Image (cartoon, helix red, strand yellow):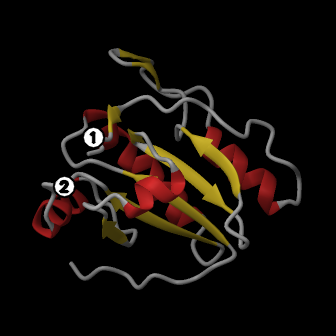
Amino acid sequence: MRQPPFRQLPLRVLIFLDTECPICQQTARRVQEMATRYDNRVQFLAIYPTETVTLADVTEFNRAYKLTIPHQLDPAHKLVKKYKATTTPEVLLLSAQNRILYRGSVDNQFYRLGRSRPEPTEFYLNDALTAVMVGKPVAIRQTKPTGCLINQP
């Protein structure tokens, strides 16, 4: 499957993912649903910071979890360092001026390593997107992401 082009839109969502992280695997569908819902208004970009992940691994992950958002490998951790990402999955909602409007978990399904709910009850990223779209401030600007740590050299 060919990767969609990266379009520079006023709002961007960066999501740091790892193909082997079970929480990333279980979160991918909800991220794709948001990317589809906000198409042409918000640019989503998946960033894969694991040094050993290949484009073939990402292609397989995207196929398995029906993820169609553009992606970028970040084995040198340039984006990890720039945005101070620590965990996969971790999302950042960025303004047109590259200001972080929200940082943290997609939702609250996974609230501690090894602890989860059957379904999320709070939708942090979606709530932040909804607020920004109607010109309101983001109520919860940061949460602690739960997932796999990004191994930094």
Residue 77: which quarter of the image?
bottom left
Callout 2 amino acid: Glu
Name the residue rendered at 46%, 46% in the picture.
85
Above or below: residue 96 compared with residue 117: below
What residue sits right under mark 1 in the picture? 151
Q: Residues within 10 Å of mark 2 (few under 14, many from 20)?
A: some
Residue 15 placement (x, y as % from top left):
45, 54
Residue 28, numbered label? none
Left or right, residue 75 beside residue 131: left
Asked which secondary structure carries label 2, the reply is loop
Q: Residues within 10 Å of mark 1 (few under 14, many from 20)?
A: few
Seen from the viewer's position, the closer of residues 115 and 145 is: 145
What residue sits right under mark 2 in the picture? 51
Seen from the viewer's position, the closer of residues 147 and 36 is: 147
Asked which secondary structure carries label 1, the reply is loop
Do labels 2 and 1 touch, CB within 8 Å? yes
